[in-house]
Amino acid sequence: MTTRNLPAVGILLVAVAVTAGCGGGDADPSSAAPTASSFSAPAATGLPSAPTPSASPPNASGAASPAAPPSVAPEGPTQRRPASPPPVVLPKRPTGAPGAKQVVDAFRAAGLKVPHPKDRSVDCGPDGLGLGCSELIATDAVTVYVFPDETSAGDIAETWGGQSYRRGAVVLNYLEAKTPAADRPRYEKVLDRLG
């Protein structure tokens, strides 16, 4: 063998080792990686061909080289995720502050419209709007937010500008409401009597 043939033999050995290591343990022998004996001789091109490699080529000392073991992914227990996300834990409303349902009930008792009330408190948490409120009830007339403290309520009321009203930790939001601006003071007066 000449020194010109050594690179070709090395590339062939690497290709055989890689394909043998990637076999994945298939039971179907037709899909197994090719072996050294399955390579066909190259066509006559006038170039010297590389000899067919043996199972273990000799190293510089003449002894056979051990084959590299195939890499195996470590096996471990499969982590199972819960079937549903953990419940959202919202901050508690301050002591003495009316609850969102209590505010909506007071509006109704005062003869104000609060059609289609929906408890959307889950929207206060990180998976919803992330506002950090304690309670949230939306109606077609007004949305009632209760915050864990007056500072948070004041910050949100400022953000919403003229489309909201704050009394303590409770904020009334008119952004998506159908309440005419002339009727809003009636809602605010009822809230003022609660807080």
Image: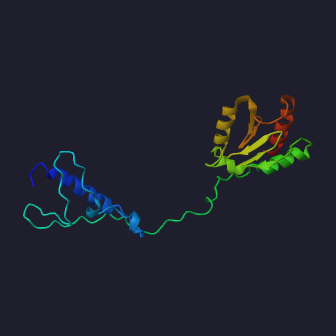
Q: In which quarter of the image is residue 61?
A: bottom left
* Residue 75 visible, this orientation: no
Of residue 120 and residue 75, the one placed in the foreground of this image is: 75
Residue positioned most to the right = 111
Decide: is 120 above or below 167. below
Of residue 13 and residue 108, the one placed in the foreground of this image is: 13
Horizontal and vertical percent position of residue 95? 71, 52
- Is 70 left or right of 94, judged from the image as shown? left
Q: Which residue is drawn at 14% across and 67% down?
A: 64
- Is 14 left or right of 179, judged from the image as shown? left
Coloration mode = rainbow
User: Where does the C terminus fall, quadrant-wise?
Assistant: top right
Decide: is 129 above or below 22. above
- Is 6 left or right of 177, judged from the image as shown? left
Q: Which residue is drawn at 20% across and 59% down?
A: 52
User: Where does the N terminus fall, quadrant-wise?
Assistant: bottom left
Horizontal and vertical percent position of residue 118? 79, 49
Q: How many labels does the image show?
A: 0
* Residue 56 visible, this orientation: yes
Q: Which residue is drawn at 27% across and 66% down?
A: 69
- Is 114 left or right of 100, judged from the image as shown? right
